[in-house]
Image (cartoon, rainbow, N blue to C red):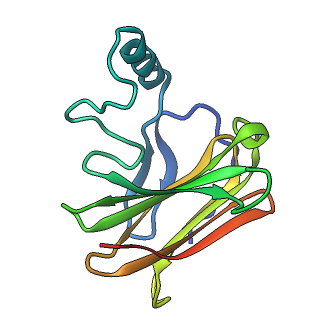
């Protein structure tokens, strides 16, 4: 289980957390990436276009397979996003703050596991932007994910079967 109660500011690179599998967890967001996105829009490139070789929040080769508001009904406090890499057979999940919880140190949690309940990965703490990314190898298996923002939650079963 990953426990990290520190408050994240604008991280770049390794955040000091090592996953249970021994991998160093990296955060790829930076001011440079934000500026690059603004430059793309201001130069007339299509806002939804992804340049070849672009890296998302989970790393290269991951495609988004789902985006879900937290909670399911009522005022949105966050977004649970799920990604998959067909090359590696791994799923990735993040729980982002939304509105008043984005950029404010708030309890944020994300969990990803197999629907059989045999294995799960977690990340939680008082984060400013998001919990995760967390990864789970699940080629040819179905996953379930959950996200908490404050006390609001969203739990989904059989979100993606890779």
Side of 35 relative to 108 (left or right) = left
The residue at 36%/17% (across/down) is 40
Q: How many marks?
A: 0
The residue at 69%/43% (across/down) is 98
- In the rendered view, would you say 119 is above or below 26? below
Side of 52 relative to 129 (left or right) = left
Q: In which quarter of the image is residue 68?
A: bottom right
Side of 124 relative to 114 (left or right) = right
Q: Where is residue 151 in the image (x, y as percent from the top left)?
A: 81, 62
Q: Where is residue 3 in the image (x, y as percent from the top left)?
A: 63, 63
61 or 69: nearer the viewer: 69
Residue farthest to the top?
A: 43
The residue at 20%/33% (across/down) is 52
The residue at 26%/80% (across/down) is 140
Q: Where is residue 100 in the image (x, y as percent from the top left)?
A: 79, 38
- In the rendered view, would you say 99 is above or below 162? above
133 or 65: nearer the viewer: 65
- In the rendered view, would you say 49 is above or below 31? below
Location of the N terminus by quadrant is bottom right
Q: Quadrant of residue 123?
A: bottom right
Location of the C terminus by quadrant is bottom left
Q: Position of residue 102 (x, y in %)?
A: 70, 39
């Amino acid at each position: 289980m990953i426990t990290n109660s520190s408050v994240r500011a604008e991280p770049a690179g390794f955040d000091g957390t090592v996953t249970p599998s021994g991998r160093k967890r990296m955060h790829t967001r930076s001011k440079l990436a934000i500026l690059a996105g603004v430059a793309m829009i201001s130069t007339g490139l299509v806002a939804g276009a992804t340049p070849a070789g672009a890296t998302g929040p989970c790393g290269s080769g991951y495609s988004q397979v789902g985006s879900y508001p937290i909670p399911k009904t009522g005022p949105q406090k966050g977004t649970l996003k799920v990604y998959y890499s067909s090359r590696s057979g791994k799923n990735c999940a993040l729980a982002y703050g939304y509105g008043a919880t984005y950029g404010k140190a708030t309890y944020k949690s994300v969990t990803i596991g197999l629907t059989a309940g045999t294995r799960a990965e977690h990340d939680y703490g008082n984060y400013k932007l998001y919990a995760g990314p967390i990864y789970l190898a699940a080629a040819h298996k179905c996953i379930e994910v959950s996200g908490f923002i404050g006390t609001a939650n969203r739990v989904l079963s059989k979100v993606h079967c890779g």
